[in-house]
Image: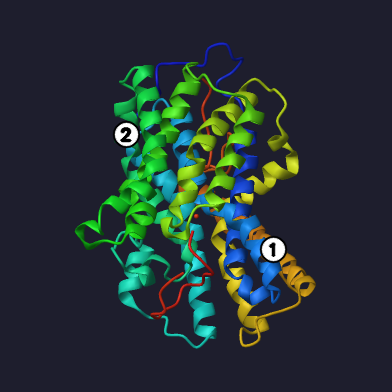
């Protein structure tokens, strides 16, 4: 792989740290945590009015995975190494995501065994450990097996596999083609949950599987991010600033909250794709130009670096809290529920820090043969992460159950 010939024009440096994108990674991970808290609201809250308010407030987290996919394409296209090879690229991705995935898989097995559930299921183990568990149509017990959020890594692995070919093709196109592909991708994501209704389960597959889990479909968001990065790097991006972009994102979330449930989880991605497509370039340019950005706070950047580990452990922690405190008497007064949610969050964050510093970073150094190079914003080589740039992520009841609260 070689880097795109274009460079950022009218900006000081194309090698700036993208710390704002790191901070946004934490916000997206927190949104997904809130989504799963919302999906477990019957465990936490007895007050139906409080539960309804919680549902409305936290439902926006359903677009978090879409954000990560767009971000992933953006940062990988932004940070291509000029002399890189496909094999080196794939090994760095493996070194970043697989150790966390494998360790959380083992922890999930222990928790399931603690609950007295059957863990040994070779089919689910095979799909999960090979990161193919988002592919089987109509098998939610496979999609969300063991540590449920890991289903999104199945999509990311497919994106990584295709990235060298996609990038080689895109860099040969003119900026007008990048604009066209980006616009068509936003339109595709926006209409898919509604357009799929025209077809009645094509190929016998469920609508949910097609629009939410099928990796080639989700790759459109990844491709969108790639085109946005090429436009920004080449100085061809023309879009609003950060404030307007945030307003567009929030407006999309508000629209999604009023759409019927029949459109599924992908309706949130449909309503926020445009906003995210504006926000990422605006934040990247703010970092390149060193202009003011609320997402660059030091603590927020650190949380962004821990966000992949947090994403991988948060449902395990939620599962452990639920069953430690018992689900036979799930409803609690609103205040007590709030305290329990806060305790769950702190538990998950502490576990994420341990996973990040004890597993993620040491294994990256071990597998890549050296110390981690300075990152351009987020942990190197993760889903939606910003890796180094040189100069220039519940349905089935079948066992084993996922350590999960909902679907992301």
- Measure the alpha-carbon separation of dots 1 and 2: 38 Å
The numbered mark at residue 45 is none
Q: How far across and down, in percent of the image, does residue 78 sit?
A: 48, 29
User: Quadrant location of residue 314?
Assistant: bottom right
Q: Nearer the viewer, residue 39 or 133?
A: 39
Q: How far across and down, in percent of the image, does residue 6 sit?
A: 43, 16
Q: Is residue 337 left or right of 262 when viewed as pictured?
A: right
* Residue 351 seen in render: no
Residue visible at 55% across and 21% down in the picture: 14
Q: Secondary structure at mark 1?
A: helix
Disc nearer the start of the sequence (1/2) = 2
Question: Is 236 rendered above or below residue 102?
Answer: above
Q: Residue furthest top?
A: 10
* Residue 182 seen in render: yes
The residue pinned by badge 1 equals: 345
The residue pinned by badge 2 equals: 166
Q: Residue furthest right?
A: 335
Q: How far across and down, in percent of the image, does residue 332 sit?
A: 72, 79
Q: Secondary structure at mark 2?
A: helix
Q: Nearer the viewer, residue 265 or 355?
A: 265
Q: Is residue 225 left or right of 324 when viewed as pictured?
A: left
Q: Residues within 10 Å of mark 2 (few under 14, many from 20)?
A: some
Q: Residues within 10 Å of mark 1 (few under 14, many from 20)?
A: many
Q: Nearer the viewer, residue 362 or 25?
A: 25
Residue visible at 73% across and 72% down in the picture: 337
- Quadrant in which the N terminus appears: top left
Residue visible at 49% across and 61% down in the picture: 149
Numbered disc total: 2
Question: Is 408 rendered above or below residue 27?
Answer: below
Question: Is 368 rendered above or below residue 292?
Answer: below
Residue visible at 64% across and 25% down in the picture: 286
Question: Is 329 rendered above or below residue 319?
Answer: below
């Amino acid at each position: 792989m070689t880097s795109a010939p274009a460079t950022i024009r009218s900006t000081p440096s194309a090698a700036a740290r993208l710390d704002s994108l790191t901070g946004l990674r934490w916000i997206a991970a927190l949104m997904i945590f809130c989504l799963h808290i919302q999906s477990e609201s019957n465990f936490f809250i007895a007050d139906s009015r409080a539960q309804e308010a919680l549902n409305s407030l936290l439902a926006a987290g359903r677009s978090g995975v879409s954000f990560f996919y767009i971000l992933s394409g953006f940062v990988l296209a932004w940070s291509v190494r000029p002399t890189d090879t496909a094999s080196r690229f794939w090994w760095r991705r493996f070194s970043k995501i697989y150790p966390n995935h494998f360790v959380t898989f083992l922890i999930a097995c222990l928790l399931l065994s603690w609950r007295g559930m059957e863990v040994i299921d070779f089919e689910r183990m095979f799909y999960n450990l090979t990161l193919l568990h988002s592919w089987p149509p109509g098998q939610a017990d496979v999609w969300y097996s063991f540590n449920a959020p890991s289903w999104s890594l199945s999509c990311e692995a497919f994106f990584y596999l295709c990235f060298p070919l996609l990038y080689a093709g895109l860099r040969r196109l003119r900026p007008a083609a990048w604009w066209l592909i980006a616009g068509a991708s936003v339109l595709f994501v926006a209409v898919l949950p509604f357009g799929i209704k025209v077809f009645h389960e094509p190929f016998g597959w469920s609508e949910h599987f097609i629009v939410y889990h099928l990796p080639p479909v989700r790759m459109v968001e990844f491709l969108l991010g790639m085109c946005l990065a090429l436009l920004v790097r080449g100085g061809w991006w023309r879009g609003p600033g950060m404030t307007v972009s945030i307003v567009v994102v929030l407006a999309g979330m508000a629209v999604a909250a009023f759409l019927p449930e029949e459109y599924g989880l992908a309706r949130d991605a449909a309503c926020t794709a445009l906003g995210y497509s504006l926000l990422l370039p605006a934040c990247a340019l703010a970092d390149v130009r060193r202009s003011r950005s609320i997402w660059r706070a030091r603590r927020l950047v650190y949380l962004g670096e821990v966000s992949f580990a947090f994403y991988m452990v948060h449902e395990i922690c939620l599962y452990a809290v639920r069953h430690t405190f018992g689900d036979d008497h799930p409803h609690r007064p609103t205040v007590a529920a709030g305290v329990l949610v806060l305790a769950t969050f702190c538990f998950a964050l502490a576990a994420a820090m341990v996973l990040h510093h004890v597993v993620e970073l040491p294994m990256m150094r071990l597998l890549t043969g050296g110390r981690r190079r300075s990152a351009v914003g987020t942990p190197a080589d993760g889903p939606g992460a910003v890796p180094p740039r040189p100069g220039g992520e519940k349905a089935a009841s079948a066992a084993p159950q996922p350590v999960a609260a909902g679907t992301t």
